[in-house]
Image (cartoon, helix red, strand yellow):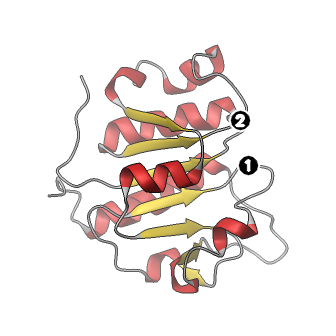
Amino acid sequence: MIMTLGKTYNVVLYEPEIPPNTGNIIRLCANGGFHLHLIKPLGFELDEARVKRAGLDYHHMAHVKEYNSFDEFLEQVKPSRWFACTTKGSVTYSDVAYEAGDTFVFGPETRGLPASLLAQVPKEHQIRIPMLPHSRSLNLSNAVAIILYDAWRQQGFSEIS
């Protein structure tokens, strides 16, 4: 059974590469009622044991959909507002007032979001998680959790409607 919120947050993984990260994010989305959107190509098959192991038995509780391209995602979902989550962002994630229905786009673990995708979103919607200087990036599933839980906290951890 998939439990969803009225107008939930969307998590987009653009060309994810590491199965356990996606499994952890499936579990996160199942527990928060968030929708997960996967942009192909994926660096693995969704039925791989490593994805299932990380997601445990939550996969059936999560809303997960695959798309052939980011443009296909935009056409089908039509997000009213989306944020590129990137180490190149100039806005700290905690400085944004999030709204129900917001969409958060994360890039592949080894490359981040491509410049062509970043060019589609205003600079004020390119958000980052602060890190020490000379740090590369956080683990993808950790970054998703940090940003999503701050957005949900702003909604009082209640069902979003």
At horizontal 65% and vertical 22% (from top left) the residue drawn is 45
Amino acid type assigned to the residue bearing label 2 in the image? Ile
| Left or right for 44, reference 66 | right
| Horizontal and vertical percent position of residue 109 | 73, 49
Q: Which mark is residue 109?
A: 1
Q: Mark 1 or mark 2, which is nearer the start of the sequence?
A: 2
As measured in the structure, the alpha-carbon distance from the residue carrying label 2 to the one carrying label 1 is 7 Å
Residue 105 vs residue 138, the one in the foreground:
105
Q: Residues within 10 Å of mark 2 (few under 14, many from 20)?
A: some
> Which image quarter: residue 33?
top left
Q: Check the image and report above or below for 96 versus 61.
A: below
Quadrant where the N terminus is found in the figure: top left
| Left or right for 114, reference 50 | right
Report which residue position mark 2 lands on.
Answer: 18
Q: Check the image and report above or below for 48 versus 108.
A: above
Quadrant where the C terminus is found in the figure: bottom left
